[in-house]
Image: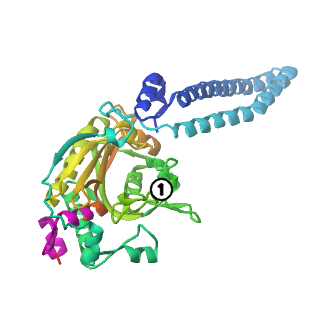
Amino acid sequence: MLTLQTIKADPEFVIGRLAVKGFDGRGVITEILEIDNERRRLQQLTESDASRLKKLAASIGALMKQGKKDEAEEAKAEVARIKGGASGLQQRLEECEKRMTDLLLTVPNLPCAAVPEGLTAAENVVEKEGGKMPELGPDALPHWDLAKKYNLIDFELGVKVTGAGFPFYIGKGARLQRALIQFFLDQASEAGYTEVEPPFVVNAASGYGTGQLPDKEGQMYHVTIDDLYLIPTAEVPVTNIYRDVILDPDTLPRKNCAYSPCWRREAGSYGKDVRGLNRLHQFDKVEIVRIEKPEDSYAALEEMKDHVQGLLEKLGLPWHILRLCGGDMSFTSAITFDFEVWSAAQQRWLEVSSVSNFETYQANRLKCRYRGADKKTHLCHTLNGSALALPRIVAALLENNQTPEGIVVPECLRKYTGFDIIN
């Protein structure tokens, strides 16, 4: 969440940047400032009472020694009066603190200066593109037909066992899936990321730490009896490694990667754009996460973009990078770049990665800090990105690489699959 210091330093600037995300922040920012004034007033009263009690306690003993019993009794009565009001004062102060936190949790992150204005995906900016567009004949099949033809993925069986959006991967389809996971993990390891295998369920504190809660409850699967959540991305458990941690600056940056299945309810998703692998409730993904000093985070963001671009180039997929406009960004992000690949049979772009810098927004929730040269603690910057999400990568690979002889496996995957064509 935003720090109170950021809001107080320039409220009009904050309101203006929130508007870039399509968020009308004037009312909530005004209320936050009013509550802060009341909180500071109550805090001053509390401190004044504490100081007064200390002086009275010292004076009572002195008055008794001097034989001034009546004055000592008056001092004791004053102590009782102050203590009697202290509980009410403390309660009001705690109410202010809670209301302040509740309000701060409703305020999105500020988009950085490089974020283009706009409210819809149509206003995103294509920043870069590459790869060769495949030339398919008129008989080219979409991936869901290819999956059935070559017995790679069984969507109907998934519906039977669980429901829509939970497919079975079979035979060479399962092996291709496993090959992609291993390839992505190996590439991340070569790039200096330390692999972790995190829990696939998290507690509510972890969801709040990275901003999934209270913003995205409707998209998360909630195990109510244990009050745990199935993770929507490995970003959540991996970033929470650093919750309530003060890091040695010499150990920064921290670079982690993780494979995990991911679960998203995708409430309201329907129609042709969610057919096949285009949008699932359970899918596999390799995530990269970085914890950086603020002055280094934007160079790290460029490194992460280059890493994802390199993966797509090795897979031989046509790609482009979108710089998201303010209205299409997530609640928690300061800037986001989406990577999309071309799906030749569907004739559409499919998102396969989002790479984001959250600046101090997540770190403030997490209390993820480092100790600077000034011996004071400072908030880190957190970043993450998909490297990569598998379903739409698989969809594009099947469609773009189809031939009359079968589906050609990219060379970079063959040592993992053990075959170079699916037929």
Q: Secondary structure beneath disc 1?
A: loop
State the residue at coordinates (84%, 23%): 74
Q: Nearer the viewer, residue 53 or 13?
A: 13
The amino acid marked with disc number 1 is Gly
Up the image or down, 293 lies above or below 82; here it is below
**Quarter of the rendering occupied by the C terminus:** bottom left
Task: Please tell me how crowded label 1 is: few (under 14), some (14-19), or many (20+) other residues with Cα within 10 Å.
Answer: few
Residue stretch rendered in magenta on the structure: 395-421
Residue at figure coordinates x 42%, y 52% from the top left: 240
In the rendered image, residue 398 lying in the magenta stretch gets the answer: yes
> Which one is in front, 174 or 147?
147
Q: Is residue 55 left or right of residue 34?
A: right
Does 110 sit above or below residue 281? Answer: above
Q: Position of residue 372 (x, y in %)?
A: 34, 35
Query: Quadrant location of residue 279?
Result: bottom left
Q: Residue at x 43, y 26 (%)?
A: 16
Residue 316 sits in quarter: bottom left
Q: Position of residue 197 (x, y in %)?
A: 34, 64
Q: Is residue 394 above or below residue 22?
A: below
- Provide the residue designation for mark 1: 268
Residue 89 rendering spot, x and y as whole percentages: 71, 31
Is residue 74 on the magenta stretch? no
Where, by quadrant of the figure, is residue 164 drawn? bottom left
Q: Residue 391: image x %, image y %?
A: 31, 63
Q: Is residue 136 above or below residue 330?
A: below
